[in-house]
């Protein structure tokens, strides 16, 4: 039979090994979770920035035209469609301090926003 000190020494090594395995597994899990969150966050930001570019390419010219001819029905429809896009919470058209049209509300505190100038060009002049 084994000597009592040898058995105690083997149990001590076993417990240390178990503790090291649990600690290493926990650290690896935390690091992988953090990496996953970071990659997911970066992907979501990329999608949102792509949507900002889509808004700029698709919606700005029709909005400028509707503002220029004072077509409030067309403007309301465009802004309404804009507000239905994914990730869009609020759309506001304003002239300095005066809000002309606003749809939606900011329900979150940490948001991304863009401001686009709506100068209408006639014969390449603003």
Image: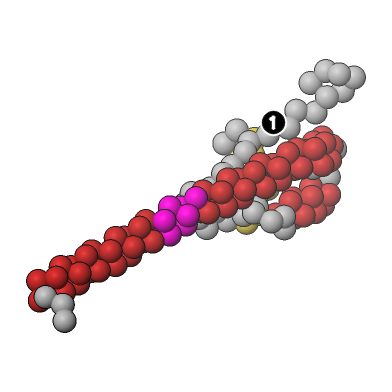
Circle 1 packing at 10 Å, graded few (<14), some (14-19), many (20+), is: few
Q: Residue 7 or 124: which is nearer the viewer?
A: 7
Q: Position of residue 3 (x, y in %)?
A: 11, 75
Position of 28 with respect to 107 (left or right) is left
Coordinates of residue 80 in the picture (x, y in percent): 74, 55
Which residue appears at 90% of the width and 19% of the height? 123
Image spot of residue 28 (x, y percent): 42, 56
| Badge 1 element | loop
Q: Is residue 1 left or right of residue 54?
A: left
What secondary structure is the stretch in magenta mostly built from?
helix
Q: How is the image coloured?
A: secondary structure
Query: Is 113 drawn above or below residue 103 in the view shown?
Result: above
**Residue 63 showing in the rendered view:** no
Instruction: Point out the stretch of residues depicted in magenta.
Output: 28-35
Determine the residue positioned at 20% across, 69% down.
10
Occupied quadrant, residue 64: top right
Residue at the extreme bottom of the image, as rendered: 1
Q: Toward which corner of the image does residue 29 lie, by quadrant?
A: bottom left
For the N terminus, the image quarter is: bottom left
Q: Which residue is mark 1?
A: 117
Identity of the residue furthest to the front in this view: 1
Instruction: Where is residue 105? Give x, y as percent.
Output: 57, 56
């Amino acid at each position: 039979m084994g000597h009592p000190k040898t058995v105690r020494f083997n149990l001590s090594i076993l417990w240390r090994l178990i503790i090291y395995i649990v600690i290493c597994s926990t650290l690896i899990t935390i690091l992988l979770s953090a990496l996953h969150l970071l990659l997911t966050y970066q992907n979501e930001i990329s999608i949102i920035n792509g949507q900002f570019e889509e808004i700029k390419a698709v919606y700005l010219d029709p909005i400028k035209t509707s503002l220029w001819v004072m077509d409030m029905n067309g403007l309301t429809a465009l802004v309404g469609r804009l507000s239905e896009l994914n990730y869009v919470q609020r759309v506001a058209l304003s002239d300095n301090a005066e809000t002309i049209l606003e749809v939606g509300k900011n329900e979150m505190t940490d948001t991304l926003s863009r401001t686009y100038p709506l100068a209408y060009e006639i014969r390449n002049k603003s």
